[in-house]
Amino acid sequence: MQFKNSKITYAAHSYIDFISDAGTASVNASVAELIFRHTDMEMGEGTFKMGLSHIYNNYCHIVDTGVGTNWKLNIQQYIKPYDSSMRLEGFNVGDYLYLDGDGYILSLIHISEPTRRHGI
């Protein structure tokens, strides 16, 4: 396994990547999150490249993806209301969570409708 000497910041968390022939593991030690990506196939070239990957996220248990415990495909994305049984740091009941194609879990917070102004 090769260590990639870089950190990426995504959704206010820092991840450290580990790269191997089997795939890429992104580790966020501050919230004990592991995301592993294994590319199954890719086709196309340049900006027109498409692919299918299996993604493991140890927090993926909050959604039944039909692929296996904590696994999903990169083409699967979910929006789901948060409840306290999910036990995710930084989420509150009433928020929504978004499980994106890369396996990251993001918080969607309801913001009330802005006041409308009439006239000039």
Image (cartoon, rainbow, N blue to C red):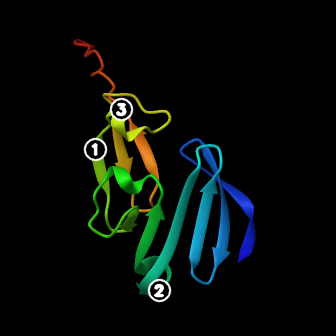
Residue annotated with mark 1? 80
In the image, farthest residue toward the left:
118
Placement of the C terminus among the 4 image quadrants: top left
In front: mark 1 or mark 3? 3
Residue 45's label in the rendered image is 2
Above-or-below relation of 64 to 13: below
Q: Report the side of 59 relative to 11 (left or right).
A: left
Q: Secondary structure at mark 1?
A: strand
Q: Regarding mark 3 in the picture, which secondary structure is present there?
A: helix
Determine the residue positioned at 44% across, 80% down: 49
Q: CA distance from mark 1 to mark 3?
A: 13 Å
Q: Which of the two marks, 2 or 1, is nearer to us in this view?
A: 1
Residue 111 sits in quarter: top left
Label 1, residues with CA under 10 Å away: few <14, some 14-19, many ≥20? some
Which is more foreground, mark 2 or mark 3?
3
Quarter in which the N terminus is drawn: bottom right
x%, y% of residue 72? 36, 66
Going by the numbered disc 3, the residue's amino acid type is Ser
Q: Nearer the viewer, residue 69 or 100?
A: 69
Q: Horizontally, is 38 left or right of 80 in the view? A: right
Q: Earlier in the sequence, mark 2 or mark 1?
A: 2
Residue at (59% x, 67% y) in the render: 25
Q: Name, please, the residue furthest toward the right.
A: 5
Mark 2 and mark 1: Cα distance apart in space: 34 Å
- The answer to whether 115 appears left or right of 87 in the picture is left
The answer to which image quadrant residue 52 occupies is bottom left
For the residue pair 120 and 24, the one nearer the viewer reads as 24
- The residue where tag 3 is placed is 84
Asked which quadrant contains residue 55, the reply is bottom left
Above or below, 22 relative to 118: below
Q: CA distance from mark 2 to mark 3?
A: 43 Å
